[in-house]
Amino acid sequence: MSSDRVTAAVASLVAAVAELADLDCDQFTHLELVELLGELEAVTWQLPAVGHRVIARLQREASPTELGAKSLGSVLTQRLRISGKEVRRRLSEAEDLGPRTTLNGQPLDPKLAPTATAQQSGTIGPEHVTEIRSFLGKLPMWVDPEVRELSEKTLVHVGSGTGPEELGKVAKQLATAIDQDGPEPDDRDRARKRSVTIGPQQADGMSRITGLLDPEARATLEPILAKLAAPGMCNPDDREPRTSGTPSQEQIDADDRSVGQRTHDALIAIGRSVLSSGELGQRNGLPVTVIVSTTLQDLEAARGSGVTGGGSLLPMADLIRMAAHAHHYLAVFDKHTNEALYLGRTKRLASAGQRIVLHARDRGCTKPGCTVPGYGTQVHHTTAWAKNGHTDVDDVVLACGPDNRLAEHGWTVQLRDGVVEWIPPPELDVGQARINYLHHPERLLAPVDDESAA
């Protein structure tokens, strides 16, 4: 299909939607209205199939850099204005349901051809697709390809006549029939399932951890926790918490923490030990340690929160308590001028000092839409070093590795009133944001006159 026909097809679709939007529903009977909803749903179900083909080709051929982003996911997030979660879902579905080619360009069917065909015809919808892909994704690795394909065809047939909830029940029964007893789990299944996820920070500062440990990880943690999570060990309520040796009977008797709380406190002790050992070396020009920025006013009043290099909020009381255990990088700024007043650190290197100031000023990657926190960033020169750029604090910004490289392709990065701006080349300028507020949400609430002080 030529680009003109694509444009005409989309124009026709837009016109049809506009006509539907002006439709007078009062002219239909109730039965006809239900029928209309059914037809609209079937058409809606078909549209993602077009998107799968588009994304599949972009994945095969396109250079994200030429499209103005560091990855195809970033391209879709910026141009379609959809969430990262939705982008990941679409990319994953396109990988399973979009067309493929061999290395020499010969066409191949989608990985899940029956599902893709049914979706393109409008007989199953997004919820059906989710159920089918979830079923196939959870099948053990030992299941034969023929059984997988037959199972997929069965679920597509069932889904073509039932809703996703009924399909989910059938999928559960089918999984049980395939793996009634199941062989011993193998290394591939375990490796696929292993994960530890730290969730977003909640309003009270807490973060939920979820995941699955493989046998090696559990065996490694068991003796460590048996020592450090024992009653009386690593108790923050003790005046001098015991982190080595054996706790006294008094410490054991006074320990009223739950097992979960003792495990939590043991993990803090493990982290402190690793950070203070120096064995982690450096990352992006700084020793691996905790980096926190705050204001002088909050530090003196012991109130408010500092911002870590990972983008999380650290209450001032916790920051002060942490400072009693180890030397961390702490950048303190005057509330109104953002002038660096004090840099406390165990080793003084000019480049390290500049990086600390950048952590406090930028907090993370400055490219609009990028969520990479300070710990994952590099220093980017607003004027390239090869073009006589200076390594001054006012001439460098934080950017993640991919965005740092992207800036070499026609982007202009500048610092204006203490705020970093990314200006795209003319051919990629679609009116997108110039400033990344994700690491500085307070700037959105600040008066215009005070924005430079946020």
Image (tube, rainbow, N blue to C red):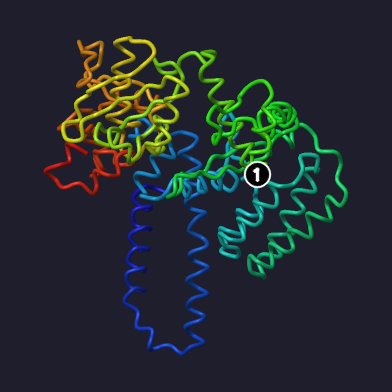
User: Where does residue 294 sit, x and y in percent of width and height?
Assistant: 30, 32
Farthest residue in the front direction? 250
Farthest residue in the left direction? 449
Provide the secondary structure element on which disc 1 rests.
Answer: loop
- Horizontally, residue 327 falls left or right of residue 154, namely left
Instruction: Determine which quarter of the picture holds residue 121.
Output: bottom right
Neighbour tally class for label 1: few under 14, some 14-19, many 20 plus, Cα within 10 Å: few
161 or 76: nearer the viewer: 76
User: Where does residue 454 sit, x and y in percent of width and height?
Assistant: 22, 39
Instruction: Determine which quarter of the picture holds residue 22.
Output: bottom left
217 or 338: nearer the viewer: 338
User: Where does residue 363 sit, x and y in percent of width and height?
Assistant: 33, 31
User: Where does residue 84 sit, x and y in percent of width and height?
Assistant: 44, 45
The residue wearing badge 1 is: 258
Count of numbered marks: 1
- Horizontally, residue 157 falls left or right of residue 8, namely right
